[in-house]
Image: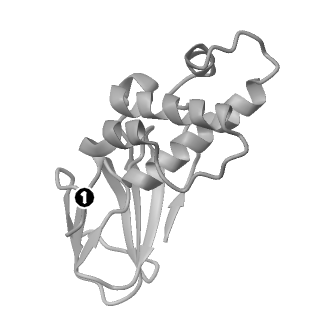
Amino acid sequence: MLIDLQPPPVEPITLAEAKAFIRVDHDDEDALITTLIASARDQLEAYLNTAMIARPMQVSVPAACEVRLPRWPVMSVETVLSDGVEISEYHVDLRRRPATLSVFATDHIEIAFTAGYGLGPEDVPAPLRQAMLLLVSCGFEHRDIDADTMPLMVDALTMPYRVVGL
């Protein structure tokens, strides 16, 4: 199970950027647009198994030799615990997608790690920021529709960032 230990300190797009994109020049809708920004980030992060803004996370898994970390890019692994005891001998491949951690443990494993492209919006790839703006726009314009699928342009922008399983 994946847990965000802290919310992102900033969003990948600002309220001003979103308002400019959807052509809103008043403050009456700021609360809604702010909610749409957070929702768009959550939706894309889940869809892509990524973390846009760097933040600490924790994953708990049953005993395994190799653990695939559920968010990418992984910046660092802080601790690895097996049944509450810290393990110091493990190998992490941060360049692999998803990042993997190889460890010998016979009990439940908890891994604390930091994932994200960087600390600020400028670190997030432009296509992902554009996809967020499109999701905010869709949410703003179509408040009454419960969409289960990604809009085609969002899917096209995010395709290079998706990991497709075979």
Q: Residue drawn 41% across and 39% down?
A: 154
Residue 99 vs 1, above or below: the answer is above
Pick whichever, 63 or 52, lies toward us.
52
Residue 37 percent coordinates (x, y): 60, 34
Outermost residue to the right: 28
Residue 2 percent coordinates (x, y): 48, 65
Pick whichever, 157 or 65, lies toward us.
157
Residue 79 percent coordinates (x, y): 38, 62
Q: Residue drawn 58% across and 22% down?
A: 18
Residue 23 vs 10, above or below: the answer is above
For residue 130, which quarter of the picture?
top left
The residue to which callout 1 is attached is: 99
Label 1 neighbourhood size at 10 Å, few (<14), some (14-19), many (20+)?
some
Q: Is residue 12 visible?
A: no
Pick whichever, 82 or 25, lies toward us.
25
Residue 4 vs 123, above or below: the answer is below
- SS state under label 1: loop
Q: Is residue 163 visible?
A: yes
For residue 125, which quarter of the picture?
top left
Relative placement, left or right, of 12 versus 104 is: right
For residue 143, which quarter of the picture?
top right
Residue 103 percent coordinates (x, y): 23, 75
Q: How is the image coloured?
A: one colour
* Amino acid residing under circle 1: Ala
Outermost residue to the top: 25
Residue 43 vs 130, above or below: the answer is below
Q: Quadrant of the C terminus?
A: bottom left
Q: Residue drawn 22% across and 81% down?
A: 65
Outermost residue to the bottom: 106
